[in-house]
Image (spheres, rainbow, N blue to C red):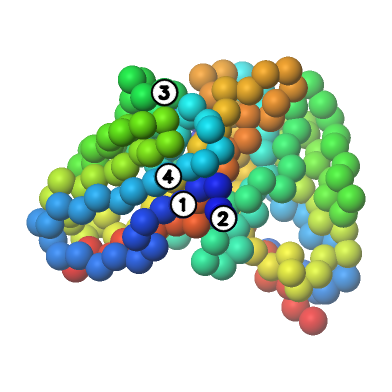
Amino acid sequence: DADVTQTPRNRITKTGKRIMLECSQTKGHDRMYWYRQDPGLGLQLIYYSFDVKDINKGEISDGYSVSRQAQAKFSLSLESAIPNQTALYFCATSDFGSGGDSYEQYFGPGTRLTVT
Amino acid sequence: GEDVEQSLFLSVREGDSSVINCTYTDSSSTYLYWYKQEPGAGLQLLTYIFSNMDMKQDQRLTVLLNKKDKHLSLRIADTQTGDSAIYFCAERSNDYKLSFGAGTTVTVRA
């Protein structure tokens, strides 16, 4: 089974609709992240959470909100979707690490969201 | 803020070496990473280098770091068709967030 899972994998929605993307992890990591990927722009950080009670805005948080329901679950919501939120969304996790850890981030397979 | 730049495309003949270049701006970066993204998949860590190192070799992969010029490169020896993917350079600043470049799409031709 995959360590980081995302649901749904693909979603088409209409402008103005509320949508939630979900992420679950079995790695036992405290830190979780949401990124969006646009062609030619790489990955941009939307929100990140260092533990259940610590949630922080990333570079492009406007129009998004998040909820860290448990250590293993981090969901991303678009309150009122708009077409320029059409993108590939990735969830990632990392451990705090100790003694030489690379602080690697582990990525889910992504959710392709289209807003029409 | 952090800024990571890399060229967008690279075409290489099968069996040749590929070199992907990256520049970054944050002099406090502690770790620098290369991630690989295959079609329809998430990013997977290929290799990383700590900022006090100049070079790291891992099988067909060689990472070179020039801290003075803030330049990072990834060399893939004997490039194979399975190496066709998007390669992302990323830096970690001291607050443990990653900043990614736009990604270099590597196409391996026979």
The residue under label 2 is which amino acid type?
Answer: Asp
Q: Distance between the residues labelled 2 and 1?
A: 9 Å
Instruction: Indicate the secondary structure of the residue bearing disc 3.
Output: strand
The residue under label 4 is which amino acid type?
Answer: Ser
> Outermost residue toward the left?
A16
Instruction: Indicate the secondary structure of the residue bearing disc 1.
Output: strand
- In the image, what residue occupies the spot 45% across and 56% down? A110
What residue is disc 2 on? A1
Q: Where in the figure is residue A48, as x and y percent of width and height?
A: 40, 31
- Asked if marks 2 and 4 touch (Cβ < 8 Å), the reply is no
Chain ID, mark 1: A
Q: Distance between the residues labelled 3 and 2?
A: 24 Å
In-front residue for pair A84/B68:
A84
- Asked if marks 4 and 1 touch (Cβ < 8 Å), the reply is yes
Q: Distance between the residues labelled 3 and 1?
A: 18 Å
What residue is disc 1 on? A5
- Give the label, 2 or 4, closer to the camera: 2
What residue is disc 4 on? A24
- Asked if marks 3 and 2 touch (Cβ < 8 Å), the reply is no
In-front residue for pair B26/A15:
A15
What residue is disc 3 on? A51
| First reached walking from the N terminus: tag 4 or tag 3 | 4
Chain ID, mark 2: A
